[in-house]
Image (cartoon, rainbow, N blue to C red):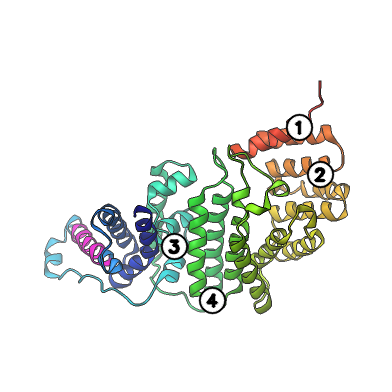
Amino acid sequence: MKTEVEDLLRELAPQVLGALVRHFGGFGTCEDAVQEALLAASLQWPVEGVPENPKGWLVTVASRRRIELWRSESARRRREESAAAQAPPEPAPVPSVDDTLTLLLLCCHPSLTRASQVALTLRAVGGLSTAEIARAFLVPEATIGQRISRAKQRIKASGAEFRMPPEAELPERTATVLHVLYLIFNEGYTASSGAELHRVELTAEAIRLTRQLRARLPEDGEVAGLLALMLLTDARRPARTRPDGALVPLGEQDRGLWDGAAIAEGVTLVSEALASSPIGPYQLQAAIAAVHDEAERPEDTGWTEILGLYELLNALAPGPMVTLNRIVAVAMVRGAREGLAELDRASADPALAGHHRVDSVRAHLLDMAGETEAARAHYSLAARRTLSLPERRYLESRAMSKARPG
């Protein structure tokens, strides 16, 4: 019952917040009121049962709290007389329109830092509590609370209105939303630090929010591409760790454990997007993931096709991780020596300086080339540089496997 209530509250959270902001204005105060309504529901509904109209219940409770906050704010500003002369706003009606997309765009407002966009999206649109977000990112709850508070203040100071941006601005603003959802998913799929490899609550939330975004923008090929990428990647999660939490690399995974339904949905999504929309980076990444997922065995992987897709991706949206992944594909198609030569050139990029993945890739390619001792040294170096404990344990085990007996 509790899980069902939590799922329902997260689904309704952006709809209720959208209703309040549209009716009352003032994103920050409305968001505080909605959070209190969600808390009340999480305590009452498991005991008393879910009301017949749960969205209406939340809108009513949040509206009452918003009015209380309005009165309190008026009093603090020493405007009791003028406030008393005004009737407080009426409770917001339950809307038929869903403002989730508008809310996503507001949470990813360009005046906010990326970290603030992520935190505010998870709180306001995802319905996660401050404590849940803090646990997912392994930072103090106070840090996330301050981040969200500053974000709301900045939105207020910017004069941002709760409305869809002009048509000309929508592609750029949507691209920001996609990037924020991508960051949330990546942090969940490979946590940047800590003892756990996965933060399942983040990957699940990223997929859920991207599904909502696709429902609002069904013709956008990059929205479909991102959803496909998430599904095709997350499909491998059941085989990605051993029972003790140890990392299992792609080539060693039990593919029978992969989620076939997620793979089928992801392949369909990216295939339709590539056929009907301008090609974008998320579609290309999803296509690469699809080639991996459709190979029944590691040796069946279409590395030539993957390299071609990385060439396109590198031309369209170059970046440090694209560079490293493309180099692996080069090695698989043209040999480890050519991959190492390209890695030497790429290592001059300041964005890759000291990154543990450079050492990890170099170790893998040296291993492929038969240079066991050099591979061991770079596996060890990569292990020392990563903040992820599962990755560190895996890299240390690879280094140990290359040690000379004796």
Q: Which mark is residue 401?
A: 1
The residue under label 4 is: 218
Residue 378 colored in magenta in the image: no
Viewer can see residue 385: no
Q: Is residue 59 above or below residue 246?
A: below
Mark 1 to mark 3: distance in Å?
Answer: 47 Å
Alpha carbons under labels 1 and 2: distance apart: 15 Å
Q: Nearer the viewer, mark 3 or mark 2?
A: 2
Q: Nearer the viewer, residue 64 or 241?
A: 241
Closer to the N terminus: mark 4 or mark 3? 3
Q: Amino acid at mark 2?
A: Leu
The residue indicated by pointer 3 is 107
Question: Who is closer to the viewer here, 383 or 355?
Answer: 383
Q: Reading the chain from its start, which is encountered first: label 4 or label 1?
A: 4
Mark nearer the N terminus (1 vs 2): 2
Left or right of 257? Residue 216 is left
Range covered by the magenta-colored residues: 59-74
Relative horizontal placement of residue 344, taking residue 181 as reference (left or right): right
Query: What residue occupies the far front of the structure in this picture?
Result: 256
Name the amino acid type tagged 3: Cys
The answer to whether one can see residue 319 in this image is: yes
Per the image, the residue denoted by label 2 is 365
Tell me the tag on residue 328: none
Q: Nearer the viewer, residue 28 or 191?
A: 191
Q: Amino acid at mark 4?
A: Pro
User: Which of the two discs, 1 and 3, sits closer to the camera?
Assistant: 1
Counting from the top left corner in percent of width and height, residue 42 is at 30, 54
Task: Indicate the amino acid at tag 1.
Answer: Ser
- Give the mark nearest the N terminus, 1 or 3: 3
